[in-house]
Each structure stands twice: as structure tokens, then as C-alpha cells.
Amino acid sequence: MQQDSQVNRKECIKFELRRVIFGTDTRLGRYFDISLIVCIILSVSLVFLDTLASIHRQYGELIGALEWCFTLIFTLEYLLRLYCSAQPIRYVRSFYGVVDLLSILPGYLVLFFPGANFTLVIRILRLFRIFRVFKLLRYLSEGNVLLRAMLQSGRKVFIFFFSVSLIVMVLSAIMYVVEGPESGFSSIPKSVYWTIVTITTVGYGDITPQTSLGQAIAAFTMLLGYSIIAIPTGILTAEISQEMVRSKDIRRCRNCLKMGHENDAKYCDNCGDSLEADL
Amino acid sequence: MQQDSQVNRKECIKFELRRVIFGTDTRLGRYFDISLIVCIILSVSLVFLDTLASIHRQYGELIGALEWCFTLIFTLEYLLRLYCSAQPIRYVRSFYGVVDLLSILPGYLVLFFPGANFTLVIRILRLFRIFRVFKLLRYLSEGNVLLRAMLQSGRKVFIFFFSVSLIVMVLSAIMYVVEGPESGFSSIPKSVYWTIVTITTVGYGDITPQTSLGQAIAAFTMLLGYSIIAIPTGILTAEISQEMVRSKDIRRCRNCLKMGHENDAKYCDNCGDSLEADL
Amino acid sequence: MQQDSQVNRKECIKFELRRVIFGTDTRLGRYFDISLIVCIILSVSLVFLDTLASIHRQYGELIGALEWCFTLIFTLEYLLRLYCSAQPIRYVRSFYGVVDLLSILPGYLVLFFPGANFTLVIRILRLFRIFRVFKLLRYLSEGNVLLRAMLQSGRKVFIFFFSVSLIVMVLSAIMYVVEGPESGFSSIPKSVYWTIVTITTVGYGDITPQTSLGQAIAAFTMLLGYSIIAIPTGILTAEISQEMVRSKDIRRCRNCLKMGHENDAKYCDNCGDSLEADL
Amino acid sequence: MQQDSQVNRKECIKFELRRVIFGTDTRLGRYFDISLIVCIILSVSLVFLDTLASIHRQYGELIGALEWCFTLIFTLEYLLRLYCSAQPIRYVRSFYGVVDLLSILPGYLVLFFPGANFTLVIRILRLFRIFRVFKLLRYLSEGNVLLRAMLQSGRKVFIFFFSVSLIVMVLSAIMYVVEGPESGFSSIPKSVYWTIVTITTVGYGDITPQTSLGQAIAAFTMLLGYSIIAIPTGILTAEISQEMVRSKDIRRCRNCLKMGHENDAKYCDNCGDSLEADL
């Protein structure tokens, strides 16, 4: 009997913890979320600042210590989530479960390569800590409207990028032939890099055409990029406009001809006539 | 009795001054505004020109004298506004009150640092004089339609910039690892600077990837920036289109089915039928 | 009597000439226009090519001779237009009259500066010959729809550019203070140049921020330019969309409810009911 | 009799081959298409990689051998298409027939210039092999909607580009005069190149204005390019929006006033009333 109540109490704590950690509807849950967001931003900022040579020299050890604190905090968070989750296996396999694990793993893996400062392995492990920012995605569920519009226009955008890559390939090959392998256009892959730099109007200027013919083709490439920049904008704008209109009711009251009712309105809000079609 | 009429006359002058200084409906008020705009533009132009070494050497003293004139003019304007305002405290605390004060303060503060030419303090004080241009905002109340469309799409734009900064952070970290700390990508903050330069298609070319892998990632970054440039355009265009349509009446006459009446029309301007819904 | 008929014949020739030179509805008139367009393009191309040092050395005299031919042709054209125009004074004062005169004047003015090759005066006179391209505007009367949309949104665009110039001025002053007069940002006018290069995402890279704070402000400037690039696009797109819709009839047949009739349709093209509202 | 059946069998094989090679509705046909796409991409990648000096030195002979394999595969494909086509002459003259022939010709033509490695002729022949990517166009018939919108707005875009080239010419001539022939603006064609680099916001920075006046004109050019970038976007967006709306049915049920029926609907899907107009 006592054991039963103990199991019950344990379940109760688990449930409360779940509300705090996974939910956002309690005050404690909101505090938990906000402090977690602060921790993520601080820890990512530290990783960024540590790459500055001057800061690494002066505060390197302090940053290392803070880094350990954050790793421990995120470990604790991971274990808590694991403990109070209703289906721990499903959490571990979920997108956020993997992100949470990747956020703490590099901290421990570094222990296995102790002597090697600044080697490639360490640098890549450091890189992985950046993926902690993806933990923030949890707090961002409003992007869906945008995402839907983008997916809607996905096929058209794919065709667009396919056509652009055809153009890029042909222009790159032409520029390689025109400017010759002794110039900055030493190979077609490099020429592809230049064409993308030009067609997207980025224009670094690290590779520029030197011959008159090359400059003429470059000018043509720029004007092309300048005009095809309009295409994805046009597609997406039309799609977003439609998405906005679609989310509005287009029913018109048969009695008073009023439009623009709420999506779930049963009666006209102007004259009271039924909006339902009588079958 | 005489005192009363004096107070009355004073009030009368105050009221007249207020109409001239704060209003735009009298001829004198318009002259006042126009001469003030000219003063603002001239004084800001002087600050700009004074930073040109050749002009500073030749006309430095003349500019200094003119600078004092403008400071005195703006001081006079500030005192007049303070005097004739109905609620002086509220004016001082308002946005324009603060801007007006900041426009004249640097001129006087310079007196406390007489020997120090070209020091940082002086330079910053000079900078503050530029804020005089904000005085021009007073004459610009038409931007509201644009502003409203921008605020309407504010939430979507925030999500957009949040997503962009996530992408920028991850790409910066990857480029830092790929190009290595010996290249131009000497730290992640510098790498972030490069990523923003690239994703916005600015492309200075002061930092460019040297390795093949780096150039491939750079090309990907450009194409990404090239396509996501479409998103804010799409959002804002859809919003402005809606704002324009919203300001038009969509009522349709029940008798002759005509659309496009004035917003406050009571009867159809074509057949005379009542546009009001009979309840 | 004979004189009368002579005057009449003269008038008749004038009228015929006018149809050929000013009109485009006769075959001869079209031939005249096409050969004139060819002359304009050829003569402007010659001016361009002549500035290439290698071509000037080799073909300088040939180009000079051709230049004289074109000047004579355009002189003949100007005199003919003057002769057969119904109101010669009005033609001389019109936009195209001035352009036609400016197209031939530099050719004769060059005679007054014979010894001076490549001096500034000659170079500016050469420049004026370029304005011959404006003669082409005569053959371009279709741009009106675009022009109308642009003028419609003129006020909004003006406010936009006013706001942009406020932002540019403030950012320039900040960058001048941050980077200091020893860097590329040696004066505020130069700083304004940099800010415009950056905010329009051109990004030459001839002036780049060197300090960390400067780079952070530069990144902010780029993101700002990146997002405000959306505003004129949004304004113009909404305006063009409206212009397109406006040119379509929105009348709906009262009998069969069909929409999309021709603008001048009197009866529904589907059921034959009158589209006119019975008053 | 036997001969007849033989002819028949031959025709039957031809027909089957045609279904596999030209069609996509059989499983074998899809396999054929996919393996062809893989071959095209691999062969074009080889041409690109071969231009990298390091790869050419190490794997030059292997790539040469693979190149021969691909040439043979495409030759076989060409002969098969020729054999099983119903109208071989028409196939040879068609766009894809020419592309297929150009894809294999350079491989054989190289045999006639055996000793000349890396000469211009060889390089141009190599270039032609890139045109193999156009073979991919066969698998892309969805771009039509985009293409239609672009053609629809063709006239407006032509006027736009005509106006832009007028502006470019005049600005180039002005910059040539202002900066003088001793600067990077050594000739008007070079100045045209700079103007296009600037107006399209590419901004290489290989040619930059040095004089104050030149920088002011450059700033104006950038702002101009920045604002006219909106025009093609606006045109295309409006056109795509219209194209999308056009493809939707605007019929409204006369009984229940419902809109948005399928294009070929005969009856209202809400109340069952006939959607056909009774004549």
C-alpha cells in the first residue's frame, strides 16, 4: 500500500517535471525555458569568442571552466528530459533528442584528445557545439506559414535552380576558354565559383576577367543574374499572397451579399441569414 | 485690470508664436519651417565637409564661426519652443524635445575641452550634431502607410531574421573549420562578418575562401542568400498589396451588383439602391 | 495663279516630307526611321570605340572622317525637320529639338579648338555626342505603363529615399568616428560613399572596416540594406498589380453572373443580357 | 510470307525500342533515362575536373579513357535513336537531334588535331562537350509555366533593358570624362563594364572611382541600380500572380453563390445546381 503510494508519488513528480520541462503553460516551465535559452546563447557566444586569439590568451582558462559548467547543465537537462519523458526511447530518437545529445557529447569527447590543442579533430568537435543553437528551434513554431509557402513553391524553385545551374555551367566553360588557364580562371571548377559569385551579384573581385571579350561576357552574366533574381521573388510573393488570401473565408451571404466572415461562422454576422448551403 | 490685460496679451502672443512655430497652417509658420529645414541641412553639410582635411585646413575657422551661428539659432529655436509650448515639461520629455536639446548641447560642451582637437571625445560630440537631421522627421508624417505594412509583417520578418542568424552562425563555424585560423577566417566573429558580407550579396572581397572546399561552401552560401533575399520581399509585397486593397470598399450593390463604392457611401452611385444591409 | 499652285505644290511636298520624317505610317517613313536608328547606333558606337587607345591609333583618321559624315547626316535631318515642321519654333524648343541640336553642335564646336587633342573641353564635347542616344527615345512610346506605375508610387518612393538618406548619414558619421580618420574612412563624405556602396549591396571592397566594432556596424548596415531592398520592390509590385487589374473590366452579368467582359462590351458574351445598368 | 513476318518482327522491335528510348511509361524506359542522366552528369563532371591541373597530371589518362567510353555510349544512343525513330530526318533536324550530335562530334574531331594539346581549338572542342548538359532539358517539361510568365512580360522587360542600356551608356560616358583616361576608366567600353558591374550591384572593385565627383556619381549609380532592381521583380511578380489566378475557375453558382469550382465542373459541388449558363 505504502509502496503503491510511493510509485504514485513518483509518477506525480514525473508528471509535474514533464509539465515544467516540456510544457510552457506553467510559470516554472516558462522560467525553465528562458534560463535554458540564456544558457544556449551564452555558451554559443563563448565558443565564438574563444576563437579570437587575444581573448583565448587572456581568458582561455575561464572560458574552459565555463564551458564545463554549460556541458554539465546541458547534461543535467538531457538526463531530466530522459527521466521524465513518457516514452524515453522516442525522445532519444527524436530530432531534439539527437540535438540535445550532440550538444553535450563534444564536451566529453575532448577528454580523449587531451594534448592536442587546435588540431583539426578538436576544431571539428568545437564546431559541433555550435549545433546547440538548434535547441532554440524548439521555441519557434511560428515559421510554419513561411515554410508552407516555400514548400508550395518548391517544385518551381527546383526548376529555377536547375535552369540556373545549366546556365552557370555553360557560362563557366565559355569563360574558361575565353580567359585561358593562365588567368584567374585556371580551371572550370574555379570558373564555376566565379560565375556563381557574379550571377548572385556578390562580386568579391578576387577573380576578374582581364580580356575585353571576357568583360563583355561578364557584363552579360551580371545583367542575366540581375534579371533572374526576380524569378524566385516573383514565385514566392505570388505564393505568400495566395496563402494569405486562402486563409480568409470567401463565403458571401446569400441574403445581404456580405463577404469576409470568420472561417467557422454558421450565420452571416450582418443579417443573420444562415451561411450554410441548404441541400 | 491692466495686469489682467497684460497677461492676456502675453497669452495671445504665446498663442500666435505657437501657431507659427508648431503649426504649418499660417504663411509665417511655413516660412519658419522652411528656413529651419535649410538651417538643418546647411549645418549638417558643414559638419560633413569639415571632416575633409583640405577643407578643414582652408576654411576651418569660417566653418567654426558658422557652426556657432547655427548653434545659437537652434538654441533660440529651443528656447522659443520651450516658452510658447502649452506644456513645456511634456515638450522637453518628448522625442523631438530630446532631439532639439541634443542638437545644441555638443556645441556648448566643446567649450569644456578646448585644447583637445581631433580627440575621440570631440569626434563623438561632433557625431552628435549629426542627429540634427532627426529634426527633419517632424516634417515627414506620410511614411505611416509604409510603417504600418512593415509592422504588420514584423513577426514574420523577426522569424526570418532569426532563421537567417541561425544559418549564419552554423555557416560561419563551418567556414572557420574548413579554411583554418591561418587564413582570413582567423576567428569565428570574423567568419560571421564574412558570412554576412556574402549572404547579403555585398561581397567586399577583403576575406575570400582560398581552399576548394571553402569556395564550394561559399558558392552554396551565395545561392542561399540569393534565394532567401526573396523572402522579405515576398512578405512585404503581399502585405502592401493587402493594405492597398483593404483601403478600398468591397461592398457590392444588391440591385446592380456594382462594386468599388466610396468607403462611406450609403447608396449605390449607379442605381441609387441603398447599400445598407436591411436588418 | 501659277504662283498659287507653286505654293500649293510646295505645301504638298512639305506635307509629304512631314509624313515621311515625323510619321511612321508610310513605308518610306519606316525606312527613314530605321536608317536613322542605324546611324545613331553606329555613330555612338564609333565614339565609344574611339576611346580605346589601340583603335584610336590605328583607325583614328577613319573614325574622324566617319564622324564628319554622321554630323552632316544629322545636320541634314535637323534642317529637314525644321523645314517641313508645321510649327518650326515649337519644334526647336521641344525636347527632341534640343536633343537633335545637341547631337550636331559638338561636331562643329570642335573646329574652334583645333590644336587641343584630348583636353577636357574636347572630352566633354565628345561626351555630348553620346546624348544622340536620346534621339532613340522617339521610337519608344510603350514605356508609359511602367512610367505611370512608377509615378503613382513616386511619393512613397520619395519617402523611402528620404528615410534611406537619413540612415546613411547617421551610419556614415558613426563609421567615421569608429574607424577614425587614419583609416579608409578619412572624411564623412568618403564614409557616406562607403555606406552607399554597402547598403546597396554593391560592395567594391576599396574601403573596408578594419576594427571589430566597425565590422559589426558594417554587418548591421548590410543586413539593413538587405531588408530595405524589399521596400521599393514591394511598393512597385503592388502598384503594377493594381495597374494590371484596373485595366480589366470587373462588371458581372446580372443574369448569368459571368465576369471578365471586354471593357467596351454592351451585352454579356455568354447569355446576351444587357450589361448596362438600367437607371 | 516468312519475309513478311520478319519485316513485321523488325517493326515490332523498332516500336518496342522507341517506347524504351523516347518514352518514359515503361520500367525499362525509366531505367534507360536514369542511366543516361547519370552518364551525362558524370561525363560533364569529368570535363570540369580535367581542367584542374593537379587532377589532369595524376588522372589525365584515366579521364581520357573514360571520355572515350562516354563518347561511345552517346554515339550508340544517337544511332539507336536514329534507327528506331519513326521520322529519322526530323529527329536529326530537331533541337535534341543537333544537341545529341554536338555531344559526340568533339570526341571524334579531336583525332584530327592529335599533337596539339591545350591549343585553342582543343579547348573550344572541349567546351562543346559541355553542351551535353542540354540533353538534360529533355527531362524538364515543367518549366513552361515560368517560361510563359516570362514571355508574357517580354515586351515590358525589353523596354526595361532598353532604358537601362540608355542609362548605362550616358553614365559610362560621364564617368569616362570625370575620371579621365589615366584612371581605371581608360576607355568608354571599360567604363561601360564598370557601370554594369555597379548598376547590377555586383561590385568587383577592380575599377573604382578615385575622384570625389566620380565617387558621388558612383553613389548615384548604385542608388539607381538599387531602385530599378525592383522593376523586373515587380513586372514578373504581377505576371505570375495573374497566371496563377487565371488557372482557377471564377464561375459562381447561381443558386448558392459558391465560387472556386473545378475547371471542368458541370454542377455546383455544394447545392447541385447546374453551373452551365442556360442560353
Image (cartoon, coloured by chain):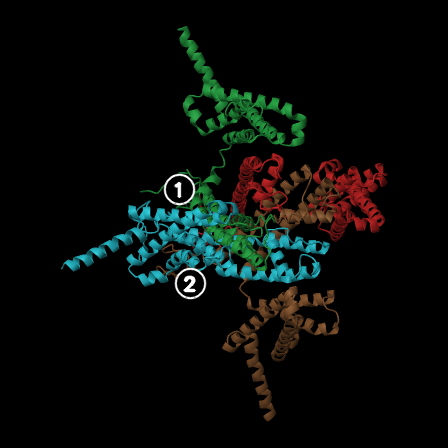
Chain colours: A green, B red, C brown, D cyan
Q: Which residue lies furthest to the left in this view?
A: D1
For mark 1, give the secondary structure: loop
Q: Is residue D78 visible?
A: yes
| Image quarter of the C terminus of chain A | top left
**Chain under callout 2:** C
Position in image of residue D70 (x %, y %): 39, 50
Depicted D227 relative to depicted B218: above or below: below
Q: Name the residue under label 2.
A: C265
**Above or below — where is A17 with respect to A1?**
below
Q: Is mark 2 on a helix, strand or loop?
A: loop
Q: Which residue is the extreme one toward the top?
A: A2
Q: Which of A48 and C136 is in front in this view?
A: A48
D20 left or right of D3? right
- Residue at the spot of label 1: A273
Chain letter for the residue marked with disc 1 in the picture: A
Mark 1, Cα crowd under 10 Å, few <14 / some 14-19 / many 20+, is some
The three-letter amino acid code for the residue at tag 2 is Ala
Residue at the image position 64 percent from the left and 55 percent from the top? D221
Q: How far apart are marks 1 and 2 (CA)?
A: 35 Å
The answer to whether residue C154 shows anywhere in this view is no
Q: Nearer the viewer, residue C244 or A279?
A: C244
The quarter of the picture where residue A111 lies is: top right
